[in-house]
Image: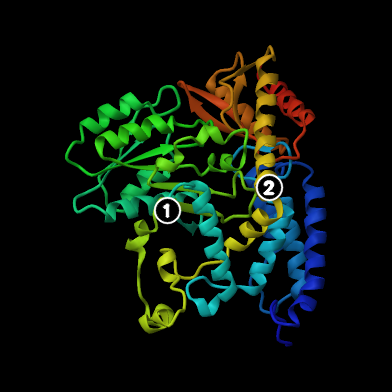
Amino acid sequence: MNTPPLAGGTAGPDALAPLLAAVLDALRTGALDRGGPLPAGGPTTTARRVHTAAHPLLPDHGTGSEAALGPLVHALTRGAADPADPLCAAHLHAPPLALAAAADLAASVLNPSLDSWDQAPAASALEAELTRTLARETYPAADHPDALLTTGGTEANQLALLLARERHPTPLHVVHGANAHHSLPRAAWLLGLPATHTVPTPTGTLDPEALHHTLASLTGHPVLVAATAGTTDSGAIDPLPALADVCAAHGADLHVDAAYGGPLLFSDRRRHALHGLDRAHSVTLDLHKLGWQPVAAGILAVHRTGRLAPLQHTADYLNSHDDTEAGLPDLLGRSLRTTRRPDAFKMAVTLRALGRDGLGALVDQVCDLADTLAEKIHHHPALTLHARPALSTVLFRPADADDEQVAAVRRTLLDDGHAVLGRARAQGRLWLKATLLNPHTQPGDLDRMLKLVEGHTPR
């Protein structure tokens, strides 16, 4: 058997060329065979097709590279939920830019690991450039802001709670709205903290007066308040300046989960919605949403680098003291993970290529598209709009349907493969959720979406 070629080195590009051709061809034909945003037939049909393409997954004698690659990429693509399809609009799952995917290929080929400088010389320098840039964008007036890369918003929120916990000698109490992401109470459980305090949010956002009463009941305890800038269900943004005032009055730390709404910072038209964000002690961002990056692309920003001190850790083979004193960068304290992909690279390429105005224009496009959809629903006699969108998420439902029928409409569309819509509960009712993250979506695509919903609503 010939030894398979490697992706790196001087011979790597020539070895990759025919394999990439096979991948691109299978991506193309797989998307055509899927014929929509989701494979029709539901989980059983998809699992059967994958089994047929993959079986046996570990044969006694291998099939060879192209015989394995082509059919399996085709099966993966045909069975994918494709966020690049305009009618795939359920989740905060953006279609990645071709530019970012190409950059991620280069990173995969070179395979740096961000746990020591000698495994990632250029990648570690670029990560430092990226984190400094995003920290300054989040905290423009701070003297020494900093940021870390994470696998996404969940890990960033967990890190925020960990860093806050380590600053206090007695158990930290975490307070958040009922609108907050589920990763926050889960992180408190994971870190051995008391159960979180949930403040009701009947209007969809965290009320400063309600927060004041909750904090007054916790006098004498260290507290971290977690606010949200872009809720998962509706994209709502908490009133950050007022919440920061309440936290300051009670001596509580403030963390803002801006995994969804954070990239409004790039938009001149919309950044005002994040006024007060820089008053938070830590901020979660995630560029695989309104940043159009392949997963993973999470960030935790802090207002001063000293907040990251609890993460410092030494393993002699990675960051020995004498190597650090000799000038080799210490990367181990930049994450709880040891081996880490160079996720900074795709983000850095995107920021450099598009600039603030280019990214801001993409953010404005999808938010404007959500406004357009909301307007169409508002004037549609058979549909009910929940509220005007704060970001790019729109909640709506058939006007005369009950919750069971709303859920059935969504599942029928999924089973047919015609449209991928999410679901959310608000004001005690179930709503269909359209999360618009595709800047290539056109108003006509929105009309098709609404016709599909109307056509599948029981009469």
What residue sits right under mark 1 in the picture? 143
Amino acid type, label 1 = Asp
Quarter of image, res 83 = top right
Residue 438 falls left or right of residue 245? right
Residue at image point 80% right, 72% down:
17
Rendered position, 380 above or below 442: above
Counting from the top left corner in percent of width and height, residue 300 is at 46, 52
Contact, CB < 8 Å: mark 2 with mark 1?
no
Rendered position, 432 above or below 219: above
Residue at image point 64% right, 68% down:
107
Residue 229's disc number: none
The C terminus appears in which quarter of the rendering?
A: top right
Disc with the residue nearer the chain's start (2 vs 1) = 2
Residue at image point 25% right, 39% down:
251
Q: Decide: few, some or many residues near mark 2? Use Cα within 10 Å; few <14, some 14-19, many ≥20.
A: many
Q: Decide: few, some or many residues near mark 1? Use Cα within 10 Å; few <14, some 14-19, many ≥20.
A: few
Q: Nearer the viewer, mark 2 or mark 1?
A: 1
Amino acid type, label 2 = Pro
The N terminus appears in which quarter of the rendering?
A: bottom right
What residue sits right under mark 2 in the picture? 95
Q: Nearer the viewer, residue 420 or 330?
A: 330
Q: SS at mark 2?
A: loop
Q: SS at mark 1?
A: loop
Counting from the top left corner in percent of width and height, residue 89 is at 65, 37
Give the CA separation, mark 2 to mark 1.
35 Å
Counting from the top left corner in percent of width and height, residue 281 is at 37, 46
Q: Is residue 420 visible?
A: no
Q: Nearer the viewer, residue 199 or 361?
A: 361
